[in-house]
Amino acid sequence: MQILRIEGGRRLSGEIGIQGAKNSVLPILSACVLTGGETRLNRCPALSDVYAAFGILSSLGCKCRFSGGIAEIDSRSIGSTEIGDALMRRMRSSIIFMGALLGAAGECVMSFPGGCELGPRPIDMHISALRQLGAVIDEKHGRLICQAPKGLKGTVVNLPFPSVGATENVMLAAVCAEGETVIVNAAREPEIAELGSFLNKCGANVRGAGCHRIVIEGVSRDKLHGCEYTVMPDRIAAATYLCAAAASGGEVNINGARVSDIEAVINVLRQAGCRVCDSDGGVYLSAPAVMNCVNTVRTCPYPGFPTDAQAIVMAALVRSRGMGIFVEDIFENRFRHVDELVRMGADIKTEGKVAVVRGVDKLTGAAVSAPDLRGGAALCVAACAAEGETEVSGVCYIDRGYEAIETTLNALGAKVRRE
Ligand code: UD1
């Protein structure tokens, strides 16, 4: 088992680049199933979730090569539409292969997906939406048997909640469906817009991705082909490094990060007293020695404050002046980092989906355990600002979404060692 040993109390400063976005590359990798060609992805991040997606693609018969941040996927030789249980359990995003395989082959067999434990993460919206397109989905012995006996047909799919994964699944299934599919109340995250751009570059006809209403005109599968695409910068990783610098009273320039992707996070950091601006193709932040806590941070679908940044911003604000309230409205079980932050001296009380943070003067290093991906990153942020040494275990969670987090933090002057 690996740990990160972090010697805190250093002011972080410097300039870093940003990795490709996990939440963008995963749906793009599953879209490769549809294209039936060769695709080259630049800035593909080396993450365990990305390796899990390569595992699924390979098991379906695709050829995957990955080196130096470039992934090449050849999906001309897909021979299977079944994903084994162990592969499905490796990450939640495995579920978006359902729409892609139904769209490509009209059938698939898979089990329920795994992923971080953020409370119940049902897939009812995915299944209901795909059924509206004509899929027949049965659950037998823990397996989902999916077929489209009469092919998929475009229709109006009204999502009860703008679920990111359900929107992606419908987009993927609709690319080659007969006629027009309209997704109403679609998720508007930047990663959805990117999936639309990628699909269009491969010959699909998707309009409005990134808006409430997405229209997909079905095309015949032989019109699709591979392409070369550069994965968007990871907005949550960018938010993490901004928070790490802010927590230590530091200064950072993140080249390649986009202000527009993380405006809700930047607004909170500005309220806390940081100066944040667009820096010619990047994001610049400079923080005061001690930040002010902020009134209320409530997680919402994009463009609201992202649930993925809740733990990270909380960690940055535990050492601050004043009191702040965090309301987690997206996932039920997303305060598991709180007990770990309390071990480091934070003053946080939770009640259901509300956490009340009272700023403290100092944090002290402790042995803590990453409860999930973003919770683990939050512990690294707090550890950089804490006095003494922190030992973070559960690093495998952090590796799902951060490309060598220790290397990036060390480039800013932190002292992090992986053991
Ligand atoms: C994606 C992101 C994840 C982020 C989340 C919310 C990826 C790979 N993951 O996850 O990092 O935290 O968006 O921004 O892109 N729900 C249902 N039924 C469903 C589907 C979802 O009840 O069929 C609920 C979920 O339990 C959750 C909420 O809807 O409470 C949001 O989930 P969703 O937007 O689907 O998140 P994911 O796509 O899983």
Image (tube, rainbow, N blue to C red):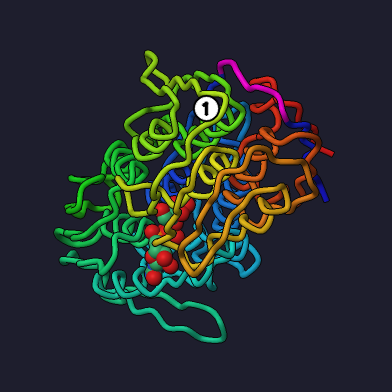
How far across and how far down the image is residue 159, in percent?
25, 66
Q: Nearer the viewer, residue 28 or 413?
A: 413
Q: Is residue 322 above or below residue 397?
A: above
The residue that label 1 is drawn on is: 18
Which residue is painted at 24% across and 53% down in the image?
Answer: 220
Q: Is residue 251 above or below residue 319?
A: above
Q: Amino acid at mark 1?
A: Ile
Split into 4 quadrants, where in the image is the C terminus? top right
The answer to whether 350 appears left or right of 34 in the picture is right
Ligand 1, what quadrant?
bottom left
Which residue is painted at 56% across and 39% down in the image?
Answer: 316
Q: Nearer the viewer, residue 240 or 94?
A: 240
Which residue is painted at 38% across and 75% down in the image?
Answer: 124
Q: How many marks?
A: 1
Does residue 329 appear anywhere in the picture? yes
Q: Is residue 10 magenta?
A: yes
How far across and how far down the image is residue 204, in percent?
25, 45
Q: Which residues are magenta?
A: 9-15
- Crowd tier of the residue under label 1, counting other residues whose Cα lies within 10 Å: few below 14, some 14–19, many 20 or above: many
How far across and how far down the image is residue 234, in percent?
47, 36
The answer to whether 212 appears left or right of 55 in the picture is left
For the view shown, which residue lies furthest in the top direction?
Answer: 280
How far across and how far down the image is residue 337, in percent?
62, 55
The answer to whether 1 appears left or right of 66 in the picture is right
Q: Secondary structure at mark 1?
A: loop
Does residue 101 appear anywhere in the picture? no
Query: Picture quarter containing residue 362?
Result: top right
